[in-house]
Image: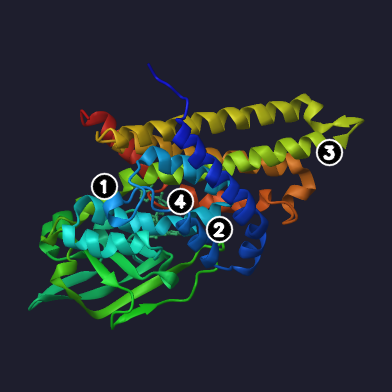
Amino acid sequence: MVDFALSEEQLMLQELARDFANEEIKPNAGRWDRDSEFPREAIRKASDNGLLTLKIPEKYGGGGMGSFEEVIVCEEFGAGDPGFATACGSTMLASYPILTGGTEDQKERYMTKVAEGCIASYCVTEPGAGSDVQSIQTEAVKDGDDYILNGSKMWITGAGYADWFFVLAYTDKTAGYQGMSGFIVDANSEGVELGKKEDNMGQRCSDTRSVTFTDVRVPSDNLVGGEENGGWMNAMKAFDLSRPTISSHAVGNARGALEEAIQYATERSTFGKPIIKHQAISFMLADMATKVEAARLLTWKAAIKSDSGEKNTLEAAHAKRFAADMAMEVTTDAVQVFGGYGYSEEYPVARRMRGAKVVQIFEGSSQIQRLIIGREMTSGN
Ligand SMILES: Cc1cc2nc3c(=O)[nH]c(=O)nc-3n(C[C@H](O)[C@H](O)[C@H](O)COP(=O)(O)OP(=O)(O)OC[C@H]3O[C@@H](n4cnc5c(N)ncnc54)[C@H](O)[C@@H]3O)c2cc1C
């Protein structure tokens, strides 16, 4: 039997995250966005409350929970503010390759730091290679006990505040994607240079920058998994874990927009009645609600399958594609419900709509999710 009821522990976690969103995120999100202010203190508080490291095993100081608990919490962060959700999300995205493919020593050194509240970034995209990951140019060449890393990464979330980076680089350029390796690079290593914070359309509190590596010496102990050329699988598997989380951010953002639109439609009157009594508006709200519910179910399914230990690539792609596109539609409709007020920054819906857009682009665009879905449907998986 499929049971949609949350356990008592999950309900408590949801309430903790919802209270955090109402008290720490929502009152500050407008200012963070306007001033492009990175919410470092709020992220620290969320970490102190154990909300950011649910999936780090207990032996490294994390919550020892699963993807399902993570998506419950992350929906609340998205309902608080999509930019905050992304700003928090970079650390676990960088951590997944270590959790799934790192050596015990790497987990002890870096997952413990994450559980203590450090920020990390996932460095795969480059100026000339986003969707087409195989076109990356970054290279790591063995030199004694170290590797010498050279290359430029682009659009790196959290980079300005990160203690360490997960970096995908070629160790054998002749072998295509099978010649890629993952490295853990300490942010204070000589030769690491950060670009300026990008002036993005939305999610402006999240820190996005380029990171350049010039002759950076990386000890062999920081080659993820201890063996060369397993980086591609490692970096891609991280997405099976992160996409349910990103989907839950989008579900939360859309749910927040829906809740705000319902409240506004109840208070705003035209032609002698609240606009929610105009069928055109109530039908729009009904469609928005259905879409949020559907995206949540896809997200939960992707997370539950991940927790069962089964491959969830298809379910994660369904959830990410649908939730990202859904949030764009729902937040756009929420602006419509608000009329002229929706077009100003006086209400949060404009920020939600700007923040929804990037979810259709990062962690595999909506087009790339369709490619994955097509491939998975025909590969017998
Ligand atoms: C705010 C922000 C934060 C980010 N954070 C990170 C991060 O922390 N780490 C990181 O590594 N990257 C990060 N990225 C990069 C992000 O993952 C890439 O932008 C994304 O993968 C798309 O790559 P691209 O921008 O190079 O676009 P391109 O790959 O050039 O794509 C351009 C367009 O073409 C479409 N397209 C491309 N190939 C195909 C195809 N085969 N079929 C159909 N359509 C296709 C795309 O969907 C897109 O619409 C971030 C990006 C942004 C904007």
What residue sits 76% from the left and 24% below the top?
Answer: 279
The residue indicated by pointer 1 is 237
Mark 1 → mark 2, Cα distance in angstroms: 25 Å
Whether residue 236 sits left or right of residue 361 in the image: it is left
Which badge, 1 or 2, comes first in the chain's sequence?
Answer: 2
Q: Position of residue 260 (x, y in %)?
A: 70, 41
What residue sits 21% from the left and 31% below the top?
Answer: 379
The residue indicated by pointer 2 is 203
Camera-nearest label, 4 or 1:
4
Which badge, 4 or 3, comes first in the chain's sequence?
Answer: 4
Q: Nearer the viewer, residue 350 or 60?
A: 60
- Hey, what amino acid is under mark 1? Lys
- Hey, what amino acid is under mark 2? Gln
The residue indicated by pointer 4 is 51
Mark 2 → mark 4, Cα distance in angstroms: 20 Å
What label sits on residue 206 in the rendered view? Answer: none
Q: Is there CB contact under 8 Å for labels 4 and 3?
A: no
The residue indicated by pointer 3 is 268
- Hey, what amino acid is under mark 3? Arg
Q: Is there CB contact under 8 Å for labels 4 and 1?
A: no
Compared to residue 147, the image places residue 293 above or below, namely: above
